[in-house]
Amino acid sequence: MVTGGASGFGRGIAGKFLAEGARVMIADWNGDTADTVAAELGALACRCDVSKGADMADLAATATTAFGQIDILVNNAGVTHLPGPMEDIGEDDFDRVMAVNCKSVFWAAQHFVPLMKAAGTGSILNIASTAAVSPRPRLSWYNASKGWMNTATKTMAVELAPNGIRVNALNPVAGETPLLKSFMGEDTPEVRAKFLSTIPLGRFSTPEDMGNAACFLCSDEASMVTGVCLEVDGGRCI
């Protein structure tokens, strides 16, 4: 199960899992796009607003019907606010960021963790951000939401380990996704150069980068790895 799987990092993760032989369901608030991408990749699709408990309950039920058991859940769906002084970010923007980036993980715990506990196994991957480790100015509440994600990952990992459930996170640097322009405020060569100057390897991350890292952390090859927040960032957080 990959939330926000119809574009960006989520699509890259879904594609990699499919290439490795997994059966995948893409969940996205844009149902039409989810259907189109799922048809292209060979996945299933489900429209879901991850900030709403009823939608997440329906998603869990739909996935269980389709697959019988949920082995991997990737909490990838996320949003940001436009760059600006923290005191100027409106309440609506703050609430939206927290609902999609944080409350979605709460709802996932409510509706997917019991299924994994019953099975005695499972892997959960939360997509956080380098913003959680090395915050950029003017993205204050987005940064805070991703810091929350890292802490949630560790607390979930330590609590769920006895149930055979591993929980990890990825901290990607800015990538070529639909959110990039929102992070930068404007997409110009000058702004891109400024962002790239903070990444030692000199490029943005790609959906394929995230797919490769996600596949490892969710695989049996990482069976001794839990509570890790892996930076996939070209050296940004060094």
Image (cartoon, rainbow, N blue to C red):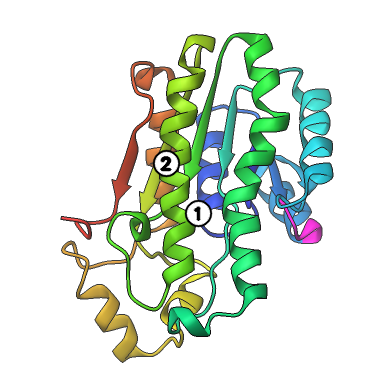
Can residue 174 be seen here? The reply is yes
Residue 123 relative to residue 202: left or right: right
Disc sitting over residue 9 in the figure: 1
Up-down: is 129 above or below 85? above
Contact (CB < 8 A) between labels 1 and 2?
no
Q: In this picture, is 145 found above or below 184?
A: above
Secondary-structure class at tag 2: helix
The residue at the point 60 percent across, 80 percent down is 90
Q: Nearer the viewer, residue 176 or 109?
A: 109
> Which residue lies at the image location 27% right of the left edge and 60% below the top edge?
134
Mark 2: few/some/many CA within 10 Å (<14, 14-19, 20+) = some
Query: Hey, what amino acid is under mark 2?
Result: Thr
Q: Tell whether position 29 is magenta.
A: yes
How many tags in the picture? 2
Tell whether position 97 is magenta: no
Where 206 falls versus 168 (above or below)? below
The label shown at residue 103 is none
- Tell whether 41 sits left or right of 203: right
Q: Looking at numbered disc 1 in the image, what kind of residue is underneath it?
A: Phe
The image quadrant where one finds the C terminus is bottom left
| Range of magenta residues | 28-32
Q: Earlier in the sequence, mark 1 or mark 2?
A: 1
